[in-house]
Amino acid sequence: MLFGLGAMISSCSKRPQSSKTGITYNDKNTGGYERFKKAHPAPGPGLVAIEGGTFVMGGSADQDVTFDYNNVRRRVTVPSFYMDETEVSNQDWLDYLHWIGFTFPDDHELYYNAVPDTLVWRKPLSYNEPYVDNYLRHPAFQDYPVVGVSWDQVQDYCSWRTDRMNENILRETGRLVTWKDKAAQGKGGKGAAAPANKDPFNTDIYLNGQYRGAGIDGKKMIADISPNAKLVGGTNGKGGKPLRPARVEDGILKQGYRLPSEAEWEYAALSLIGNTEFENIDNNKVYPWNGLGVRSAKQKTRGLIMANFKRGSGDNMGVGGYLNDKSDITAPVRSFPPNDFGLYQMAGNVNEWVQDTYRQTSFEEFEDFNPFRGNQYVNKRMSDATKAVLAKDKYGKPIKDPAKSAKKMTYAELQAYEQSLNALPATPANGNTAPGNANPTAANPTATPSTTPAIIKSPLAGKPYNPDFRGALDSVNTTLYGTTTLVNDHSKVYKGGSWNDLAFWLNPATRRFMNEDESSAEVGFRCAMTLVGTAEISPSGKPHYSVKKAKDFKAK
């Protein structure tokens, strides 16, 4: 019995080895090769897992009252991903504003640009002024969805949310100094070391090894077993052993928050998983719930409206004494039952921004796997290509430029190209002198990246390479914008219907668009996150093939 126990302990403590070379992993004596614990990452805060699959995009639309013909049915596959359980609320956005306020107290422009446009409530013939003053900030509305945010503002929020989530993970687990120790630094507490880098935490900068040192590194950093590991001041473990920050390979940090693609949003809203058994879909849906109507069929809630929308002209909430959807404008983000994926209010309340650039013919042209229109490929600029040091703007974020090439460059080409980028003057990439179109450069590192990047001469093929794929193969005559069309590369899709929309717009297949810098009292958003690893969310209880593990190699 004791022998069996000893063998078990020996087996558990044995280090894994490479199945191709036989070299032992996680052993500093064999070169420090690392094999990391394989894990299926949990979703970030606020998200639920959405198991992907095939569905007919545009298939739930039963009519086209606007005669747009912009949602032609097409079968596509959506990979598994994560999505916010609820719409982003006013309180969530106030957290964002609060962080900007205490992190950059003197940067009034940054704060101003992040504030939603509360004037979206104003109507010439309506008395909506109380909402202008109260909707965003009054505690009575803190659980209501944020509105008045543009697509551009949402992009900045997603980046901020990603950094705050990963920073919190690292501080809570001791890989960075704890929140308590960080607060002591700000107060000049006894024994509190001033941070070597005073920039706010940024995930990309951290992963590139540029956010570390005394006052930054935590007490529970990861042991660095590389033969080339060096001791860094303020980051050494017990006995003077070298430590390192977390890497992507550790699986500690999460993927970034972003807007869902149009296909992801429609798939998640329709939630056919509740009507599926053994790959057979019993019933299709018109709305995120079953049935053809907008009222509940359950005995306890029979007759209740299933979403917050406008029942008819002049009827936003029903008759006093027995209101139908209980709300005159928006409603708290958890006001109605969730759909079969566990998502709240995927119909009504507010329309929601998605990541896609609008084209009427998108459904006919894009790929059938993970369809998306809006790719604008970028690369992080290096301030020193020989040392792989990323260039940063004044907010501590990496500067990003339009992609340089359609394929990986040689190291010599990369160095030459980085030198040419850092020598560029602070001029717009597309020759347009309009505000916000200048690319960040060494001379002007805080300029807003161009939304219409320049055609770059590729050092690989000698031909122009256009990193902007928002328009895919179709071209848009910008001279006709505002004259015969409102569609251009700045037109972004929103979906879902709102408190001020009729039931037609509650159908997940319906789609509308608005300029990325515009906002509305009827448009909000929720975030998504890419799921890495296996696509199956709940494998238990389902048949699987048995797979043998690779045999260990024994040198003779």
Image (cartoon, helix red, strand yellow):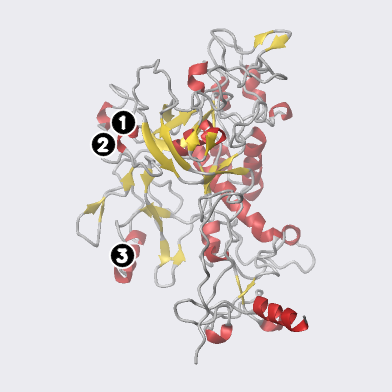
Write down the quadrant of residue 182 in the picture.
bottom right
Quadrant housing the N terminus: bottom right
Q: Residue at x 56, y 25 (%)?
A: 290
Structural distance between the alpha carbons of marks 1 and 3: 34 Å
**Residue 90 visible:** yes
Query: Would you say 357 lies left or right of 118 here?
Result: left
What's the residue type where badge 2 is placed?
A: Asp
Residue 26 horizontal/vertical position (percent): 58, 78
Q: Residue at x 56, y 87 (%)?
A: 29
Residue 144 horizontal/vertical position (percent): 65, 29
Q: Residue at x 70, y 59 (%)?
A: 172
**Mark 2 sits on what residue?**
474
Structural distance between the alpha carbons of marks 2 and 3: 28 Å
Q: Are marks 2 and 3 in contact (CB under 8 Å)?
A: no
Write down the quadrant of residue 145 in the picture.
top right
- SS assignment at label 2: loop
**Mark 1 sits on what residue?**
361
